[in-house]
Amino acid sequence: MRQAAHIFRKEFSAYFISPIAYIVISIFLLVTGWFFFATFFLFNQASLRTFYALLPVVFAFVIPAITMRLISEELNVGSDEILLTMPVTARDVILGKFCASLAMIVAMLIPTFAYPLTVSVMGQLDWGPVIGGYIGAILLGAAFSAVGLFSSALTRNQIIAFIIGLSICFALTLIDKLLYFLPQSLLGVFAYLGADFHFQNIAKGIIDSRDILYFVSVCFIGLYGAYLALRLKQ
Amino acid sequence: MIQVENLTKYFHRLCAVDQINFGIEKGEIIGLLGPNGAGKTTTLRMLTGYLQPSSGNIRVKGLNIDKHILEIKKILGYLPESAPLYHDMLVFDYLNYVAAIRQINGNKKLARIRHLADLCGINEVMHQPIGELSKGYKQRVGLAHAMMNDPEVLVLDEPTSGLDPNQIVEIRKIIKEIGKEKTIILSTHILSEAEATCDRIVIISQGKIVADGSAENLKKTTRGQNIMRLCVQNADFKSVQETLAGIQGLENIKRVSETDSLLNINLSYSSTADLRPEVYRRIKETDWVLLEFHQETQSLENIFRELTKEN
């Protein structure tokens, strides 16, 4: 565990040493800020619903960009050989890197506190869904990070890692919206597989153990897949 | 210190390392020699736990590598081929990170980094990104990385490849210095390097060990062709052939070059007897001027070529 903490610290500071963090955070804030406030005054409602409606799609783009370098860069440079011959296990590596990307996502979300603060000045804001939404955002971010980490462990090419991660995250987000042709009974099952469905539940302010279980399962599957991919290379 | 038994590694159906056995004593410097693709790097990667063997067994200090990999990694230092380090990090930050993972803390950490910086001569680049360093400095940072935990066993994969001659001499000096107390395994395809730095040489070809012993022993036991070089004045090739004909054991007389007055020839023979007195006696009876007379000792290059020839 201590080793994972060292890896976490190194990876997290690596985000801020290189320009990645600043670029990703500014793009994220620009996109969400623009789409949120562009329609905000039309609805004439003091809520963050449009922000949360948009968040899964934005995350599906941004998070694979954050995670793409985590393992594939090591494979490309060959530094995994140096890392894995020090007294660390593959589990420490995966866990440390996962926590680093999660911390990066939290760092990315912190400036968006400005939105609810602004909105609360203009009208009566119900803080329940807002807090639920942030908890959901962190869970969603964790699930997508795990998926991104898995795709990063598959290849030494960062762009391919990004595209694989993007495809999986996108599929998870939109799966229940693309299946018009399926009978109603099956649709429920597919909606249950979709990340958006669970996220919107939490964003309503209802924290249900089923939704939390879903995100934890996706995290676990993604991280275990990354672990296997890394071990298989040996 | 290290026992390797029947070590085998397959990559899909390609056999990279084939039933290798060897043992290494404490304090030895071992040179792993072989042509490209012979299985040197694969062997080292299995020794350091980066690759898992397809079959066979490795024990370090009596600990089995399957079950005690973390304990073994703690007493091992490894410098992979061409030192693949994190390019974005500063040298100091990198060594700091390695020290943290090696669980060296507090005051000891800074002292250790300083000591290694002095030993490897990287003081002047401590605050530069690793990606901007020259190959030689990168190699030295890699060496500092490998020695961070004061390892009992140091594994170096081609530590001098891509370095200039001055840097090679320096790295060798460092290796010799460390080798006084530590067990070192290094791989190389530079023969003179193995001869200069290693106590023992293991030659690998096509995944198998083809020779194992000190440089002197290898030279003694492997018999190739011996060569004597002569340079004479006032002689033509034909008369040389006639004069030297009939010496017991002499196999071939070869003209290397012939100018107006100078004739260079190579005499090759495979007998163990010393032919020099007889050759000299015969030349003395002529009116040639003998300018050079030199017997080549069996070089490691010849042995290497002999042993690693494709069948």
Image (cartoon, coloured by chain):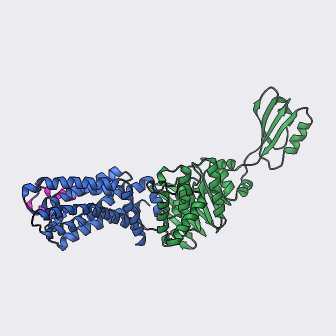
Chain colours: A blue, B green
Residue drawn 35% across the image and 53% down it: A19
Instruction: List x then y, in percent, for residue A50.
Output: 13, 58
Residue drawn 68% across the image and 54% down it: B195
Instruction: List x then y, in percent, for residue B16.
Output: 52, 55
Residue drawn 27% across the image and 60% down it: A108
Give the residue at the far right of this rendering. Answer: B285
Please name the predominant secondary structure of the magenta segment in the image.
helix
Residue A72 appearing in the image:
yes
In depth, the one of B141 and B28 nearer the eye is B141
Instruction: List x then y, in percent, for residue A21.
Output: 33, 56
Instruction: List x then y, in percent, for residue B97.
Output: 46, 64
Residue drawn 30% across the image and 64% down it: A102
* Residue B215 located left or right of residue B79: right
* Residue A104 located left or right of residue B293: left
The region drawn magenta spans A172-189
Is-magenta flag for residue A177? yes
Residue A194 appearing in the image:
no
Query: Quadrant of the image for the N terminus of chain B?
Result: bottom right
Residue B164 drawn above or below residue B197: above
Quarter of the figure with residue B21: bottom right
In depth, the one of B74 and A38 nearer the eye is A38
Is-magenta flag for residue B304? no
